Image (spheres, rainbow, N blue to C red):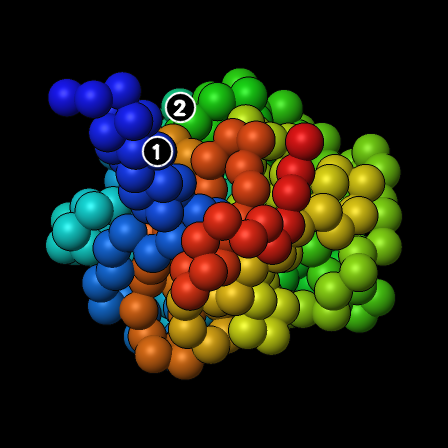
Amino acid sequence: MEKTAIVAAALALTFAICAEAYLGQVQASFRSPAGTDTRGLARAADYLYVLDGNDRGIVYRLHPISGSVYNWYVLSWPGANSGLAFSAPSYLWVGCLSNDVVYRTAAFTGSIHSAWNAAHDPYGCAPRCAGDGGSGTTHLFTTDDDPDYLFTHRLGDGSVVNSFPLGTASNYDCAFDWRNNLLWRGSGNYVYAHTPAGSIVASFPSPAGSPRGLAYNNARLWIACTADSHIYRVHCPKDFFAVEPASVGRVKALFR
């Protein structure tokens, strides 16, 4: 093969790889068992947890790729819920809008281990962790929409370490991307990346409308869209750049 042909083939392969790797690229999807009541997602090492935020308060444990349901249970407290987070070894953090309390529960059963008052509506919950599956979680992020703020809480007592205004108005869930040190949050029909200080650094269109639940694991985001009751797995690499699917090669958003 001539040198020019080899170079052309290499460029074509590079182009094809880039075309498969833009931020927000949908890789798979399945129907959420909570349907339009999905109000939070959390990602463990082997499972995806889905919060049905209606007044019954149901948590589903799913296979993260196929979406098949392993089990489900009803939360033991009354009221509407929003925001879900997972921390190792096996805890779920659930925000309750009816009393502004964040509950730490056993992930498999929902039994309560502890609880603290967030002093605001905890619409979004995410672990500030150092690895996938909530490993090395030191604090819990929560978000509210009135006022629109990001809070960082100590795990033990829920005391607020700091808080910052956000540039997006939203009562949706959030997810922490430890590889890029970013908090992802849905607002309207977009998903935004915030620094832990609240600044917006990137965004991409949601796969469908109303991205109410988010979870992060292994350079992927799981996004629950209540507009069509589906959960999407999308690409979210380290040191990403986002490229419009219809015009590969044009940089839309650059990070680092």
- Residue at the spot x=72%, y=47% of the render? 201
How far apart are the two marked residues, 1 and 2, measured between alpha carbons?
A: 45 Å
Of the image marks 1 and 2, the number of the one nearer the N terminus: 1
Image location of residue 240, percent across then percent down: 54, 37
Disc 1 versus disc 2: nearer the observer: 1
Q: Could you tell me which secondary element the residue under label 2 belongs to?
A: loop
Q: Which residue is mark 1?
A: 11
Quadrant of the drawing holding the N terminus: top left
In this picture, is 252 found above or below 42? below
The amino acid sitting under disc 2 is Pro
Q: Relative to 185, does residue 81 appear above or below in the rendering?
A: below
Residue drawn where x is 36% and y is 47% of the image: 19
In percent of width and height, residue 246 lies at: 42, 64
> Which quadrant of the view contains residue 224?
bottom left
Numbered circle sitting on residue 36: none
Secondary structure beneath label 1: helix
Which residue carries the number 2 mark?
Answer: 89
x 19%, y 55%: residue: 67
